[in-house]
Image (tube, rainbow, N blue to C red):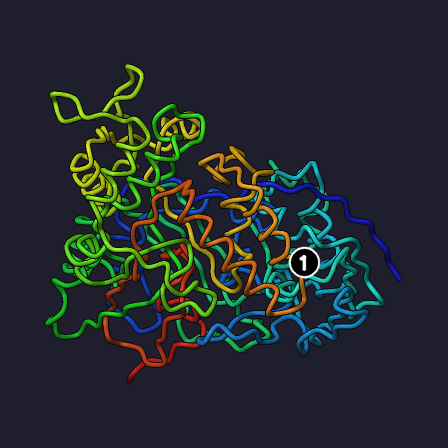
Amino acid sequence: MTTRRIRGTAAAVAMAGAVAACSAPGGGGADGGASAESVVIGVPSEPDTLSPLLGYGKDGNSKIFDGLLARDAGMKLKPALAKALPEVTDGGRTYTYTLRDGVKFSDGEPLTADDVVFTYETVLDDRTNNTAKSELDAVKEVRADGDDKVVFTLDYPYAAFAARTVLPVVPEHVAGGQDPNTGSFNTKPIGTGPYVLTGWSKGEKLTFKANPDYWGGVPKVKKLTMAIIADDDVRATRLRSGDLDGATLPPNLAATFKNDDGRKTYRATSYDFRAVSLPTGNPVAGDTAIRRALDLAVDRQAMVDKILDGAGRPAYGPLPLDDPWYAEGIDRPQDLDEARSILDEAGWRTGEDGIRAKDGRPARFTLYYPSGDKVRQDHALAYASDAKKAGIDVEVESATWEVIEPRMKHDAVLAGFGSTGDPDFGLYTLLHSSLAGDGFNNMALYDNPAVDEALGTGRRSQDPKDREAAYDTLQRELVKNPGYTFLTHIDHMYVLADRWKDLTTQTEPHEHGFASGPWWNVEDWQPTA
């Protein structure tokens, strides 16, 4: 029996990987469209790392790795490396998993319980730069009981814990001899998954081949290429030319393929929202009256109709309208009269130029969005236009993430977040004061004791009614004191050559394109002929 004590600290959930330049995925169009056994997908960005120890694949769907559990098309948990769902005892404080027989890593070495223990131990080690440590905050201890059983002991009952064990498992015999932050495993991973990485040209493409010894059966798609193409228009052009078999596209470009023979459009609902972070330390954006006025000034439905071409929903908070945890009655239409009234009462007076001011300070702040992201650009410009109607001057600027990140604690950002599976996933890191200004966590430096208390209850309570009441309180507090202006929840759009069957989509998180999309289960695709 092996026992390892885990000591971890809360940390941030990172935003998507770096935006990369575009170039051909293979020799001309040779990889695209020639065979049902080869698939080339165009995506806008690539991961920073391929190591689960640093956060890669933490929400599932990694092609290289598997977790103890996985999710099906309906987002229901199912066994993966584990034989069955966990046995839960001790009032929700102990989870026991039994491993599937005969699973091997792609280098031929067998999977054991020690590999699972090593994975979780390393993720939660203070020295590991994993930005998602706080999602495993409940874990007190993990131990291997022989070669095929893993036992997790929690500090407190955590209702959503099983869903966190979709975390990919890595081989201790390879990664254990390396620094998890800088080792070669980050770019040359070995896993138990359906595909094996064969090459990674940063900023250009990642190539994979089917794992012939995959425990779930050898995939019919033998070669998978993810072409990194940052520009939406270029991605659409290359898809139309046949250079790509499929691509993730914004709604307006996906619509141009609607009547194309031989291609099919897929639409996935998501928890992916666009919002403007309003940092507490900014003298204008941090003012509660300004925040409340902006919340009422925006026309969310117009953004859905005009920017998303109807492929989305207005966002009145971090949870989408159709989520079972959504607080009924917080929907709020654009109300410019009320927005102006709030500003008047708070002493923000309209000047000759139409811009309000208070104590000599104009109601003006900068809003950054990542360059190259047309959907965020359009949201930012629409937001600024609506804000000006209330007398608030929002100056929109594009920049790379390298420029934006140092400014996030002081300047507003057109941000994207959203996690599936449980309201704790994403909300804690978005809003809890303990994570204020910690990378992409709590970018607004939001500090609301009532929200902190609700987040704690939601995370620690086993009673569904208590959790429901906590998240209801949280959402209503965000209406009274918004640290973000929530704008839209976005449906993700994909276009693919119609040469395979059994394609589906899942409800998706903010992170998409690389792991999500109709190719979330590419290992299960079957050729149509």
Evaluate whether residue 207 shows in this view: no
SS class of the residue under badge 1? helix
Question: Is 185 on the left-hand or right-hand side of 353?
Answer: right
Q: Nearer the viewer, residue 48 or 401?
A: 401
Q: Disc 1 designates what residue?
A: 460
Measuring 42% from the left and 40% from the top, which residue is drawn there? 483
Q: Is residue 6 above or below residue 64?
A: above
Evaluate whether residue 308 shows in this view: yes
The C terminus - image quarter: bottom left
Q: x%, y% of residue 329?
A: 37, 63
Measuring 22% from the left and 49% from the top, which residue is drawn there? 335
The quadrant in which residue 238 appears is bottom left
The quadrant in which residue 220 appears is bottom left
Question: Is 144 on the left-hand or right-hand side of 173?
Answer: right
Disc 1 residue type (three-letter): Arg
Q: x%, y% of residue 39?
A: 33, 65
Q: Nearer the viewer, residue 497 or 98?
A: 98
Measuring 72% from the left and 58% from the top, which residue is drawn there? 115
Q: Nearer the viewer, residue 156 or 514?
A: 156
Q: Is residue 287 above or below residue 51?
A: above
Q: Residue furthest front?
A: 345
The quadrant in which residue 280 appears is top left
Q: Residue furthest top?
A: 360
Q: x%, y% of residue 139?
A: 73, 54
Q: Is residue 346 above or below residue 431?
A: above
